[in-house]
């Protein structure tokens, strides 16, 4: 079921990209401080969308994923050190029956 969902999502993304490219063929000059090039409006829209998605993913990774990974590693270290230390129990001197 998951494979069908991924396949449908990829096909829809390709169709969406093609529609943006075909419906926005106007050439524009893209001017940055260090570079300049001419591209179509559709390509610029697509690059902006991908750049925004990557920036958002990076932001989520830095603000959410990394702190959670740090907490998980810290918890694992605490659990390992806790199981490595023998716990004294009060029943060492009592004979078992």
Image: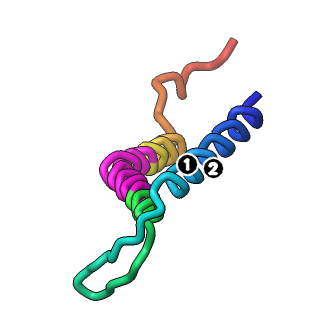
At x 36%, y 51%, the residue is 56
Towards the viewer: 54 or 73: 54
- The residue furthest left is 33
- The percent position of residue 53, horizontal first and vertical second, equals 41, 53
Label 2, label 1: how far apart the Cα atoms are: 9 Å
Q: Pointer 2: what residue? A: 14
Q: Is residue 93 left or right of residue 64?
A: right
- Label placed on residue 75: none
Magenta stretch: give its range: 49-72
Identify the secondary structure beneath mark 2.
helix
Q: Is residue 49 above or below residue 37?
A: above
- The percent position of residue 88, horizontal first and vertical second, equals 47, 34
Q: Pointer 1: what residue? A: 19
Towards the viewer: 22 or 34: 22
Q: Is residue 3 above or below residue 52?
A: above
Identify the secondary structure beneath mark 1.
helix
């Amino acid at each position: 079921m998951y494979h069908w969902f991924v396949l449908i999502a990829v096909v829809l993304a390709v169709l969406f990209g093609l529609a943006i490219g075909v419906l926005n063929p106007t050439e524009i000059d893209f001017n940055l401080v260090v570079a300049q090039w001419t591209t179509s409006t559709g390509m610029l829209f697509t690059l902006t969308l991908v750049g925004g998605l990557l920036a958002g993913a990076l932001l989520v990774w830095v603000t959410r994923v990394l702190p959670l990974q740090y907490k998980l590693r810290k918890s694992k270290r605490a659990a390992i050190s806790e199981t490595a230390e023998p716990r004294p129990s009060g029943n060492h001197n009592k004979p078992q029956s």
